[in-house]
Image: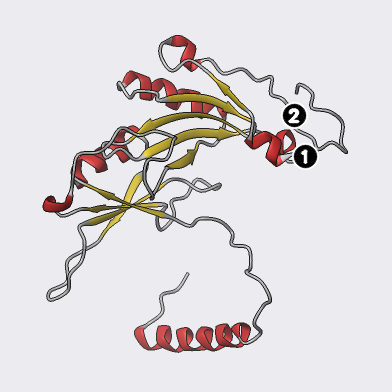
């Protein structure tokens, strides 16, 4: 690993910019598929309260904080990371920006049914079923209400809310072979489950397998 000096960094940036311009000169006929959503920024009323929730309750790590610059307006903002497939942190998956006190109203109760434009909910995946079940037990031990408990066709999920009313889907993904044959069918499948007590921590492993009409009918895995 090496560190570029200021001049080297500028020259490398210039070369990379030239290559990028060359690539962009061939205009595609349609939008190119992105890899996915890189990160999300949430506006919050109290950065300290939200920091504790997203680190102590959800499990993200704070990796950076935006520092003030004299003469420049910057938000009070922190950056957070989960762990990637190798167990390493990223530059950030989530950022929290504090809303000025005069603009921060009381949060509304989260609902899956849209009441206004903006974020409905953010889905956060745990690596596997075992870690997800442990996280559910931890959430319940901390008094976090389960607003919805649903087995979808592609995930098993619990919906909660953060201190500012942002909806959070806590999930683990089912194997690709369960849902890839009929994504529309998997998206339209929902098994509603208890949200309180021991029953809300029970997770069955017999999942319907979704297939298009041309494929074999859905069966039980």
Residue wearing tag 1: 181
Is tag 2's residue or tag 1's residue first in the polypeptide sequence? 1
Instruction: Tell me which residue sits at (87%, 31%) in the image.
Output: 216
Question: Seen in the image, is 45 located left or right of residue 23?
Answer: left
Q: Residue furthest top?
A: 198
Task: Name which residue lies at 26% across and 36% down.
Answer: 163
Circle 2/circle 1 CB separation < 8 Å: yes
Specify the label residue 56 is tagged with: none
Residue 118, percent from left and from top: 38, 50
- Whether residue 134 is situated above or below residue 154 in the rendered picture: above
Q: Is residue 30 left or right of residue 105?
A: right
Crowd band around label 2 with a 10 angstrom C-alpha radius: few (<14), some (14–19), many (20+): many
Image-based side of 79 in relation to 45, left or right: right
Q: Quadrant of residue 129?
A: top right
Residue in front for this viewpoint, 5 or 178: 178
Q: Which residue is mark 2?
A: 209
Q: Quadrant of residue 137?
A: top left
Determine whether 27 is above or below 78 in the image.
below
Specify whether 2 is left or right of 73: right
Residues 5 and 199: in front is: 199
Quarter of the figure that contains the C terminus: top right
Give the secondary structure at mark 2. loop
> What element does badge 1 sit on?
loop
Please report the residue visible at 69 percent of the width from the left and 19 percent of the height from the top: 206
């Amino acid at each position: 690993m090496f560190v570029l000096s200021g001049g080297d960094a500028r020259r490398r940036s210039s070369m990379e910019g030239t290559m990028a311009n060359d690539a962009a000169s061939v205009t595609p006929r349609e939008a190119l598929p992105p890899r996915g959503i890189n990160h999300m920024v949430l506006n919050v009323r109290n950065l300290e309260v939200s920091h504790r929730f997203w680190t102590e309750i959800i499990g993200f790590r704070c990796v950076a904080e935006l520092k003030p610059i004299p003469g420049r307006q910057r938000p009070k903002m922190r950056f957070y990371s989960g762990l990637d497939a190798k167990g390493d942190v990223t530059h950030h998956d989530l950022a929290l920006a504090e809303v000025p006190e005069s603009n921060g109203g009381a949060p509304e109760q989260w609902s899956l049914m849209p009441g206004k434009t903006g974020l409905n909910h953010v889905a956060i995946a745990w690596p596997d079923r075992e870690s997800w079940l442990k996280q559910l037990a931890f959430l319940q031990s901390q008094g976090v209400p389960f607003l919805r408990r649903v087995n979808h066709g592609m995930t098993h999920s619990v919906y909660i809310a953060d201190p500012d009313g942002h909806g959070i889907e806590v999930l683990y993904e089912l194997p690709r072979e369960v849902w890839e044959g009929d994504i529309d069918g998997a998206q339209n499948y929902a098994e509603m489950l208890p949200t309180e007590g021991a029953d809300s921590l029970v997770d069955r492993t017999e999942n319907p397998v979704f297939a298009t009409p041309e494929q074999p009918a859905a069966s039980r895995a």
